[in-house]
Image: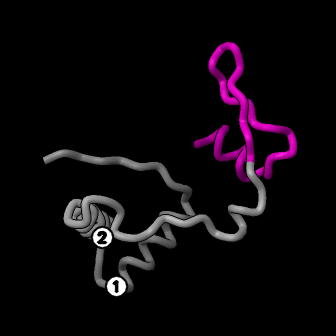
Amino acid sequence: MATIQITVSDSEKKNIEQLFNSMGFTVSSATKVFYKQALNDNGFPFTPKLSIKQTSKVIRPKISSTGALIIPDDAPQDIKDWVKNG
């Protein structure tokens, strides 16, 4: 049996636990359902889409000569935080 770990914000963890618990699932059991359905569908069990908020601005990062990701100064702060903190 393999173990998979992901990193999410504290608020995302709390919200997803509440959502899945309200449906009778744990996060682990809901994740297993997702994986099994993805395998059955041979792809995502839904169509990934960008929300309107996400499509409002395209951010074009650059790569430095050392391989570091350079985010434009005008990028939204949440994007800068995500790149910095994961």
- The amino acid type found where label 2 is placed reads Ala
Snapshot quadrant of residue 17: bottom left
Task: Measure the alpha-carbon separation of dots 1 and 2.
Answer: 9 Å
Please tell me whether mark 1 sits on a helix, a strand or a loop: loop
Q: Where is mark 1, residue-wise?
A: 23
Identified at 30% across, 72% down, the residue is 26
Identified at 35% across, 47% down, the residue is 5
Snapshot quadrant of residue 31: bottom left
| 2 is within the stretch colored magenta | no
- The amino acid type found where label 1 is placed reads Met
Q: At which x and y percent is residue 13?
A: 48, 64
Q: At which x and y percent is residue 49?
A: 54, 66
Please tell me whether mark 2 sits on a helix, a strand or a loop: helix
Which residue occupies the foreground of this view, 50 or 35?
50
Q: Are marks 1 and 2 in contact (CB under 8 Å)?
A: yes
Which residue occupies the foreground of this view, 5 or 74?
74
Q: Is residue 19 above or below residue 6?
A: below
Q: Where is mark 2, residue-wise?
A: 30
Quadrant the C terminus occupies: top right
Identified at 53% across, 64% down, the residue is 12
